[in-house]
Amino acid sequence: MSKRSYPLSKVYGLLEPGPVVLVTTRRKGRPNIMTMSWHTMMEFEPPLIGCVISGRNASFDALRTTKECAINIPTQDLAKQVVGVGNCSGETVDKFARFGLTAVEASEVKAPLIAECYANLECRVADTRLVNRYNFFVLEVVRAWVDTAVKNPQTLHHRGNGVFAIAGETIRLRSAMK
Amino acid sequence: MSKRSYPLSKVYGLLEPGPVVLVTTRRKGRPNIMTMSWHTMMEFEPPLIGCVISGRNASFDALRTTKECAINIPTQDLAKQVVGVGNCSGETVDKFARFGLTAVEASEVKAPLIAECYANLECRVADTRLVNRYNFFVLEVVRAWVDTAVKNPQTLHHRGNGVFAIAGETIRLRSAMK
């Protein structure tokens, strides 16, 4: 993997724009992937992420049991895989095999990283207080990897029903906001 | 306002892509605006939104006290206002006046709507259990308005430090995902 370790203090800038992500888990040795758009940053450092994972997903049980996952950020070249992963179940399908994705070992968690994604965040569950009511998990990012050759990642932003806006032109304004 | 009432069942598609939004509140008659990127959908219907509002913002106290706000979604023509609003405090500045934004009365809440934004969501606070720990509010959208003439909104997606990706090309893939 041609990725570099990425400072945890900069992780928020990867997720704050709201890209679709692929969440990977590994339970009883078996890797799985799900597509997710319902996430938000909750703290800069250590980076905390809040996300909703439906109880209908096999990933819900895997995350609740193992308390570990990885968040992998795809770009538009992976759009078909992103939709495909979202439309089948890890109960019956090996999604890495079906969608030609490469599982790479993480450094801090057992969940695999997806090599084809430009960024990978290794996460541990930090708070489960809103899981019963909203399926809402708070994750802490413990290690991050980014392909620094990707300057303006053309991330996918889901508008619903398979319609995605692709991150396009970048603008830069003077700001004191972090 | 040339906007139409928008079905609550479709609201998720406005926020799921992760745009920067402007949150409006009104406390003791005084309107305020803040810029926010840390939000996520939490439920389709009624639409629930989770969001982090720092205790350093005047809007935090306004939201906690009045339990009402509006989420206004700007497009790239408002980029300067979005950054300007984020770089000053409602304690000392009337942000509507300073940034030339038009306050419109909402139908269900006292918080004003921003006419210049292409979509406006009237919200009530639904859950405050994670406010003390993470400044995390759960909001319920009780009414939504959209300028339906805007087909592919060029929303702003914050990468940090005043750098924004603009929502560009739209792609449409066959998907069973909502």
Image: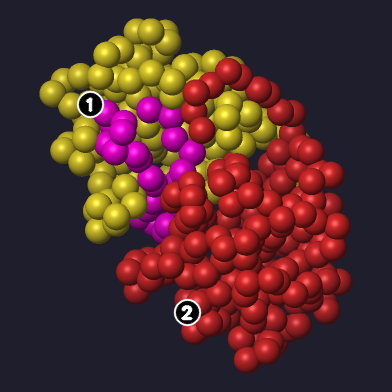
Chain colours: A red, B yellow
In the foreground, A140 or B130: A140
Crowding at label 2, few (<14), some or many (≥20) Cα neighbours within 10 Å? Answer: some
Q: Residue at x 38, y 28 (%)?
A: B34
Helix, strand or loop at label 1? It is: strand
Give the residues drawn in magenta, as a range.
B34-60
At a point 65% along the width and 86% down the height, the residue shown is A91
Asked whether, in this view, residue B155 is left or right of residue B47, the answer is: right
Residue B74 image offset from top left, x and y in percent? 51, 26
Residue at 58% in and 26% down: B162
Q: Are marks 1 and 2 on the same chain?
A: no
Q: Inspect the image, locate mark 2, and give the three-letter code of the amino acid beneath it.
A: Arg
Is residue B146 highlighted in magenta? no
Compared to residue B171, the image places residue A133 above or below, namely: below
Residue marked by disc 2 = A64
**Image quadrant containing the C terminus of chain B:** bottom right
Chain of the residue that carries numbered disc 2 in the rendered image: A
Camera-nearest residue between B176 and A55: A55
Circle 1 is placed at which residue position?
Answer: B26
The chain containing the residue under callout 1 comes to B
